[in-house]
Image (cartoon, rainbow, N blue to C red):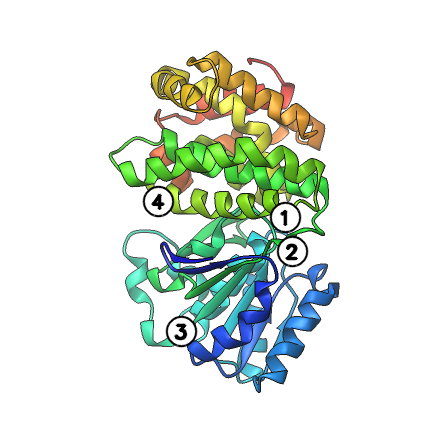
Amino acid sequence: MNWNYPTSISLGAGRIVETADECKKLRIDAPLIVTDPELAEFTFISDLKENCESAGLGANIFSGVSENPTGENVEEGLSAYKQGGHDGVIAIGGGSSLDAGKAIALMAGQDRPLWDFEDVGDNWTRVNEAGVAPVIAIPTTAGTGSEVGRASVILDTEAHIKRIIFHGLMMPKKVILDPEITIGLPAHLTAATGMDALSHNLEAFCAPGYHPMARGIAVEGIGLIKDWLPTAVSDGNNIEARSHMLVASMMGATAFQRGLGAMHALAHPLGAVYGTHHGLLNAILMPYVLVANRPAIEKDIAWLAGTLGLSPNFESFLDWVIGLREELNIQNSLSDVRIDAERSAQIAKMATEDPSALTNPIDFNADDYEQILLNAISGSGL
């Protein structure tokens, strides 16, 4: 199955074998395959390299991507890109590898440092557009939807801040959704990444402002996750469930051009400071943020609950979220993942400064964020 929205997308089991042909269509003669150390050990990565080489392409693998990709990862990948004489990137993996690959492609032809392109003001205008390399994105998780995003979230290790690097040309030219290569993902990561996809769709739905197209996509994405995430976790070999979750993940990233919110405003600094998995943080924070936002979103959430076949009220939706977390063995509190209140004031202040806070339904101040955080740490207030 093929379609274009917002970029060229191919969906189907086994379609990773088409990557070399897609490189040729994009006039990529020497792709750099960007992935993480664990995935680099999987045979589909070595097979991908061999297939590219068999097609006459000069492929190499860069696997130095951390769970939370850093500026140093991008610099090392850029060095590999230049030393190998590459002219395009195949980013394959979870959101970390996709973000790192897009950032490497952006930096391929720039003479400014990476942080000069942080998504602040008109920094994007600094990009030498002719120097941005084409990207083919192949997600191996159904979570971030980074394969259809125009940005990368990169950790500044000196400042302990996750920075968003943005430019319209960072959007991959081609996306290949192959559910077969997601089968090896363990159940706990399938759950955490799936909840990340839910957080994207849900926060996009709740964001203020008028964007009916994004809102409609978010509703459909949430429906797919409700129907298929439990199956993807309980039966990891289910190709149909894996396929639907890849699509729902991509839909979340398409929808969140409407905005995100307090889940991400808190998850970004928590991930930067504690190194905890981003999707797991969003999953834990989700009900606490829903309750905090209730005065502004209750009517919309009641409508959403009705469309999902739940009782059309806020409580039924909240109960579904909490029940889904339990079914997926997601922890109930941040203390369950070794996050305590010692740095709660610092995290709360960082949350107010995170770009995601700008589109939360309520303009929370630092005290508000700290209370949400304390509730999520203690597992109270639901």
The picture quadrant where one finds residue 75 is: bottom right
Mark 1 crowdedness (10 Å alpha carbons): few <14, some 14-19, many ≥20? some
Earlier in the chain: of badge 4 and badge 1, it is 1
Q: Which residue is mark 3?
A: 110
Q: Which mark is residue 180?
A: 2
Measure the C-alpha gap from mark 2 to mark 3. Answer: 36 Å
Measure the C-alpha gap from mark 1 to mark 3. Answer: 40 Å
The residue under label 3 is which amino acid type?
Gln
Residue at coordinates 50% horizontally, 34% vertically from top-left?
266
- Residue contact at pointers 4 and 3, CB within 8 angstroms: no
Q: Which residue is mark 4?
A: 257
Q: Is residue 138 left or right of residue 6?
A: right
Earlier in the chain: of badge 2 and badge 4, it is 2
The residue under label 1 is which amino acid type?
Ile
Measure the C-alpha gap from mark 2 to mark 1. Answer: 7 Å
- Residue contact at pointers 2 and 4, CB within 8 angstroms: no
Residue 253: give x, y in percent of width and height.
Answer: 43, 46
Measure the C-alpha gap from mark 4 to mark 1. Answer: 29 Å
Q: Which residue is mark 1?
A: 239
- Residue contact at pointers 2 and 1, CB within 8 angstroms: yes
Q: Is residue 326 above or below residue 200?
A: above
Mark 3 crowdedness (10 Å alpha carbons): few <14, some 14-19, many ≥20? some
Q: Secondary structure at mark 4?
A: helix
